[in-house]
């Protein structure tokens, strides 16, 4: 940092969690939400907290403090089916673990020494983040601030990814050169996060009115797409392409033409290493390359497991206890994993949840009058579609680092849909007219 303070950044950030937990409990829970947003995806930064007392739990403590602080102030969740769906899903997953125990597929999920219980506990932090957002975001300023903090957070993730990628030579694709990224789980997981938020801000930019801010937003999108390109994740590439296609259908038809031109010319446009990555589904002998072959074998084994327990599955978080191809712990398709572990019942809940997310975002985009809310709705709609596509190539859903920031935006969208500015019948007031000339209201 040039001041010799870099060594103290993790300690300062760690202490910040405790300060914000106290402030959340004593009347400022919104501040706690603001503080935790940048740390949701930045797992490598949070890992530094492990050197300090309760360092592995400070994020959980802060989120719970935000919820308790909001409830102490009498705040309530806005009306949405998604809160009930998460409650049902969380209970069902816990009961599913006990079903897996009864089948002999996993130990009883009792405490932190049990891997399946820890998996469930970490997963459930996502709906807690979602609930915390719904409790504390109450006005337009808070909505705008959440979007702004998300943008700054994405910029830091982009910077980390680009610096890591550019530190290596990429004349040709080399699997061994792919880094773990700031999310700490590997290039594919980082790529899924980047794809989601590239599309979110691409959609949000459609409703920015101030030219300078609009340009800055597109620069952020460009940096994020560039960072995604050098993750060499084919699933993320497809997620972005599909997101652009959806954006072209619902908002900007020119993108359909540009997308078609890109699909015809992409091999002449993208770097050689990217072209090699995309076209390497087969080796020189005409056989599937290792990554594609692994997926086929995993899906074949998953099919047998699904047919043996189609209704309830083998039990949530049991897949990690059994042996698979190359000792992999993921089916390389989240929907397949849901079917294997939680059966048809679990998949129905997941589909209903995704449908409600898409419906919420689309309604906000189409019905809101405020450009900020319309941008939030369209961006969220595109981000959800990008997430749906990315999860076809692996479990990108149960990671707090990837899905947590997305659910912050979902919670913000629900709050926006219950604010006065959302109502198409609402007449502008004097206060709103004055706010319209505020330079911070970049969507006006």
Image: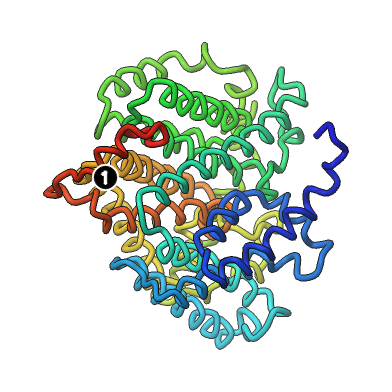
Q: Is residue 299 visible?
A: no
Quarter-wise, where is residue 321 in the image? bottom right
Residue 383: give x, y in percent of width and height.
41, 43
343 or 184, nearer to the observer: 184
- Which residue extends farthest top? 268
| Up/down of 437 relative to 78, above or below | above
Q: Kindly state the secondary structure of the residue where label 1 is placed.
A: helix
Give the residue drawn at x 47%, y 48%: 146
Instruction: Pinpoint residue 144: horizontal percent, then vertical percent.
Output: 41, 44
Q: Is residue 235 above or below residue 340?
A: above
Q: Position of residue 332 (x, y in %)?
A: 55, 52
Q: How many marks?
A: 1
Q: Give me the residue at 88% from left, 38% from top.
A: 4
Quarter holding residue 231: top right
| Residue in view at x 57 percent, y 32 percent | 228
Can see residue 83?
yes
Front one among 188 and 409 = 409
Q: Toward the viewer: 33 or 317?
A: 33
Q: Position of residue 73 (x, y in %)?
A: 44, 74
Determine whether, in the image, residue 75 is placed left or right of residue 123: left
Label 1 sits on residue? 431
Q: Is the residue marked by circle 1 packed among few (<14), some (14-19), or many (20+) residues within 10 Å?
A: few
**Image vertical order of residue 211 relative to residue 410, above or below:** above
> Which quadrant of the figure contains the N terminus?
top right
The reply, left or right, for residue 264 in relation to residue 283 is left
Model colouring: rainbow
């Amino acid at each position: 940092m040039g001041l010799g303070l870099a060594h103290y950044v993790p300690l300062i950030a760690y202490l910040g969690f405790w300060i914000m937990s106290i402030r959340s409990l004593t009347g400022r829970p919104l501040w706690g939400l603001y503080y935790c947003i940048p740390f949701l995806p930045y797992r490598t930064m949070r890992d530094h907290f492990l050197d300090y007392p309760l360092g592995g739990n400070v994020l959980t403590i802060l989120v719970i403090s935000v919820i308790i602080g909001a409830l102490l102030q009498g705040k309530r969740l806005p009306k949405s089916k998604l809160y009930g769906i998460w409650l049902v899903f969380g209970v069902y997953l816990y009961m599913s673990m006990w079903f897996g125990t009864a089948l002999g597929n996993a130990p009883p999920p009792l405490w932190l020494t049990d891997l399946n219980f820890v998996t469930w506990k970490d997963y459930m932090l996502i709906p807690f983040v979602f609930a915390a957002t719904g409790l504390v975001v109450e006005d337009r300023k808070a909505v705008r601030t959440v979007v702004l903090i998300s943008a700054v957070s994405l910029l830091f993730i982009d910077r980390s990814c680009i610096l890591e990628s550019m530190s290596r030579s990429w004349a040709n694709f080399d699997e061994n050169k792919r880094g773990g990224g700031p999310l700490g789980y590997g290039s594919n997981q980082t790529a899924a996060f980047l794809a989601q938020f590239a599309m979110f801000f691409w959609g949000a930019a459609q409703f920015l009115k101030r030219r300078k801010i609009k340009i800055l937003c597109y620069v952020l999108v460009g940096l994020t797409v560039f960072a995604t390109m050098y993750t060499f994740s084919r699933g993320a590439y497809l997620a972005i392409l599909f997101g652009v296609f959806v954006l072209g259908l619902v908002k900007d038809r020119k993108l359909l033409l540009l997308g078609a031109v890109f699909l015809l010319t992409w091999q002449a446009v993208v770097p050689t290493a990217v072209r090699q990555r995309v076209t390497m589904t087969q080796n020189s002998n005409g056989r599937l390359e290792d990554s594609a072959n692994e997926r086929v074998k995993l899906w074949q084994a998953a099919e047998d497991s699904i047919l043996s327990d189609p209704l309830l599955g083998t039990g949530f978080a049991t897949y990690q206890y059994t042996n698979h191809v190359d000792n992999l712990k993921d089916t390389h398709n989240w929907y397949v994993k849901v079917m294997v572990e939680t059966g048809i019942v679990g998949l129905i809940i997941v589909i209903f949840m995704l449908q409600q997310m898409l419906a919420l975002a689309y309604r906000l985009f189409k019905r809101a009058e405020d450009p900020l809310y319309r941008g939030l709705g369209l961006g969220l709609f595109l981000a959800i579609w990008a997430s749906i596509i990315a999860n076809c190539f692996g479990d990108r859903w149960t990671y707090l680092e990837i899905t947590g920031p997305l659910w912050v935006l979902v919670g913000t969208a629900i709050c926006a849909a219950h604010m006065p500015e959302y109502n198409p019948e609402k007449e502008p007031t004097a206060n709103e007219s004055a706010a319209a000339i505020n330079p911070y209201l970049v969507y006006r």
